[in-house]
Image (cartoon, rainbow, N blue to C red):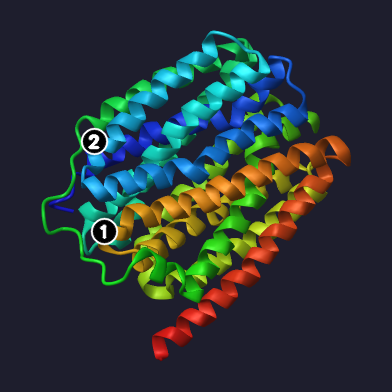
Amino acid sequence: MPTTPYWKLSGFYFFYFASIGAFVPYWGLYLRDQGFNPAQIGELMAIIMATKIIAPNVWGWLADTTGRRTWVIRVAALLALVCFSGVTLYSGYWWMAVMMALFSFFWNAALPQFEALTMNRLGSRTNRYARIRLWGSIGFIASVALLGPLFERVEVSVLPWIVLVLLAAMWLTTLVVSDGPPGVQARSTSSLLATLRRPEVLALILACFLMQASHGPYYAFFTIYLEDNGYSRTMAGQLWALGVLAEVGVFLMMHRWLPRFGAWPLLMVAIGVTAVRWWLLASLPQLLPVMLLTQVMHAASYGLYHAAAISLIHEFFPGRLQGRGQALYSSLSFGLGGALGSLASGYVWDGIGPHWVYIMASGLAALGFMVAWLGARQSRLSASA
């Protein structure tokens, strides 16, 4: 990639996802350590997801309107760092809720705009996106694998300070990236509203919503679920790391698979595998080989799914629509879907038990597969019309 600042772009992904590797797997443990019950943990995790419904769209509109995408990313990263520092001051429920809302409003804004920036810098070589994005997976692995054993030796109460260091490093990486040169972005020939009226686009967004809703119990409660089934925190960290390691393998192959198989078929495979994954997680959590298998399946649940979805979003939302397209993808899937999934999982966990939480997740993914199949069919019909 001769004209692409590979390492500068990769550095942001590394530290952004390293912060996720510290935050997502262990934040539930931290909240339980602070005295919160499962319903409250589900609510607090839902707040983090819910800000994705609004934040990416606000910042996406700002970036697309001003053309200053890098500036938006830098400001969002800095304000995320400042707001997260508030969790070190007090641990009451409402204070934590406000801090999580403020922090995630900015944290959730940075990634969609960086995705758009990366795709712009790649130009016609968007199938190489996965080779840059894989450094995010490596950052996640490094974080989650190191922190599992650490929390066997020290109190999980140090977690906010670790996340702060990673957020600071993420912000520093934004200072060395810049928007692409003039002319890199293609012009859009349709409006945002016209694009959203296309049946295949609606199907894609709905399928992604259902997919991420199914992930709500995983991100909110997987580490707690492992502990409750007799696994140590070290083993929990290793299982998280295994999942993302498998994801890296997929990212390394996506530049070949996308041109060969197409984004829609790969998306359907990813969602179908995810439905099976959650069913196995619900049914056989005490069996380590099954847990290892479900984590290897993360290669499809996240790596295959995300690379295929990003490719379709880039195709459907070209040029000046890119920032808002990425924002809509983030807000309606990871945001609305993730928030409702996390919220529902907390109440179901408290009400009828963890087993049914993951059965629910499997059903949501299965429904997402059917919607994706309809979207792929409509896309073929539109292409042949």
- Give the class, few, some or many, for how many residues have Cα within 10 Å of label 1's Cα (few <14, many ≥20): many
Q: Which numbered disc covers residue 71?
A: 2
Residue 115 placement, left or right of 298: left
75 is higher (above) or lower (below) than 317 = above
Where residue 15 sits, quadrant-wise, is top left
Marks 2 and 1 sit apart, C-alpha to C-alpha, by: 17 Å
Dot 2: what SS?
A: helix
- Amino acid type indicated by mark 2: Trp
Q: Which numbered disc covers residue 320?
A: 1
The outermost residue toward the right is 352
Residue 354 placement, left or right of 159: right
36 is higher (above) or lower (below) than 373 = above
Q: Which of marks 2 and 1 is nearer the N terminus?
A: 2
- Amino acid type indicated by mark 1: Arg
Dot 1: what SS?
A: helix
Q: Which of 152 and 218 is in front in this view?
A: 218
Q: Would you say the residues marked 2 and 1 are in contact, meaning their CB atoms lie under 8 Å apart?
A: no
Q: Which of 292 and 275 is in front in this view?
A: 275
Where does the image place residue 253, in percent across and percent down from the top left? 40, 59
27 is higher (above) or lower (below) than 273 = above
Write the residue at 28% across / 55% down: 119
Where residue 170 sits, quadrant-wise, is top left
